[in-house]
Amino acid sequence: MTALSPTKLTLEQGDFVALVGPSGCGKSTILRLVTSLITPSSGAVLVGGRDAAIRHLRMGMAFQNPTMLPWLTIEQNVMMPLKIVKPFKNTFRQDRKGAFRDRVHTLLGQVGLKDFAGHFPWQLSGGMLQRANLCRALVHDPDLLLLDEPFGALDQFTREELWQILQDLYLDRKPTVLLVTHDLREAGFLAKRICVMSARPGRIISDELVPLPQPRAIETIYSPEFVEMTQTLRALIAQVRT
Amino acid sequence: MTEKQRIRMWSFSLIAGFFLMWELLCIVLGVSDLVLPRPSEILVTLWTKFPILWPHILQTLYSTLIGFSLGVCIGVSLGVLVGTSKVAYSVAYPLLVGFSSIPKVAVVPIFVLWFGSGTTPAILTAMVICVFPIVVNIATGLATTEPDLEDVLKTLGASKSEILWNVGLPRTMPYFFASLKVAITLSFVGAVLSETVASNRGIGNVMMTASSNFQVSLVFAGLIILAVLGVVLYALFSWLERRVTGWATRDTEIAIT
């Protein structure tokens, strides 16, 4: 089955792009292509100017499912990328009790999980796991952060709280972010640019800048211009769904 | 804790009650010693013959544990080999099931033919009998690892062996330990089996000799020893299982730090 029609999406360094569209339009396929979990049947995916399969940029990814490894504590889970990704893996043995541990704890502190480092995943709520998931995606200072509906399964309040946490983390570290979501407010609140995809086989049909300065306060999402922007996007998606 | 203690007490009473019932029924029905000796007689035999039995116990334990260790090494390597590739898993599975369904009693004569009677066939029987449950469990554990968990590491650019060490094997541990508990008791059965057929040492041989001399209470003493050893080995591996794979059973003692 063809998931994507010919399309082109370019991200600048430090960009925050949200990808929205009807379900099954190939949003997640784009993320899986960028991380080279799958290879394109035709065309090319370039990351940092080179073929995605080379993986010469550091990538962090968070899925909708927190996928914490159940046999490791939160601290050990968040530390996992440092064990795998160069150059951290070279000094993992020496640093895991020192510098890396501090790094993990700082990050866990930023998302309010300081006291849960030693807990196991099943002892935490969904929202807490998703915070830990964000930490794991960011711990190795990725150049490119890929988020696949990371807050989809959370309640409204937890979601808004995590939007703010993600915004702070983004402004603090400035990675390039590609966020796949079906929540238009999430896209509008977090992203610098919003790309809309058509129904399957998907392609990008709209690529607009969000005309609001960052950092944005959570109240922004109730302002008239924000509501107008999300309404326009909504109408566009409703139109391409059929 | 009181709940746990109560269950323990009931288990203990059940065991004690079983032997008491046995003793009473033998007396009431006047069963001959040659058919079914009373537990008290068995206990006396066990006590008086213990110095003679001890080297045989060690011999059986030795064969069992050596065979079991070899079986674990082979089982884990084969299991990893079969489990890491979907193709290998589907291709090798019928052969594995075929091998594992051979009654292992049938291979003892072959080992005796090849290696003569004694310790070697006992070790080998203990080994072959425990290999397959381990292979099948390791392979199943690896083959059923959630792709999501693997994707996390793949995204980070992890190699196949890094994924195996950090996701596949830890996830397979509950399967592995479940199979170890089965395997250790099977190994034990294998060693004793081989001793009864072809050896002049070990508990199996003691029981065989005793039964041909009509020393019935010694046969039963052998049975009791086997049961106790089996329980001890099983308990040892359950304890190890709880220590290593507490996360799978959500063991609060381990989880809360």
Image (tube, grey):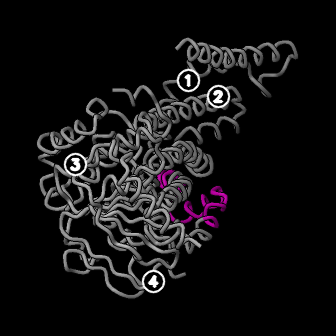
Kind of element beneath mark 4: loop
Mark 3 highlights which residue? A215
Q: Specify whether residue A199 is in view.
A: yes
Q: Which residue is mark 4?
A: A5
Q: Say whether mark 4 and mark 2 are on the same chain.
A: no
Mark 1 or mark 3, whichever is nearer to me: 3
| Residue B40 horizontal/vertical position (percent) | 68, 15
Question: Do pointers 3 and 2 mark residues of a single chain?
Answer: no
Q: Are circles 1 and 4 on residues that touch, CB within 8 Å?
A: no
Around disc 3, counting alpha carbons within 10 Å, would you say few (fewer than 14), some (14 to 19), or many (20 or more)? few
Q: Amino acid at mark 1?
A: Lys
- Which region of the structure is painted magenta? B97-125
Which residue does the numbered mark 2 point to in the structure image? B218
Measure the C-alpha gap from mark 1 to mark 4: 84 Å
Q: What residue is rendered at 81% in x and 17% in y?
A: B26
Residue B246 showing in the rendered view: no
Which residue bears the numbered disc 1?
B49
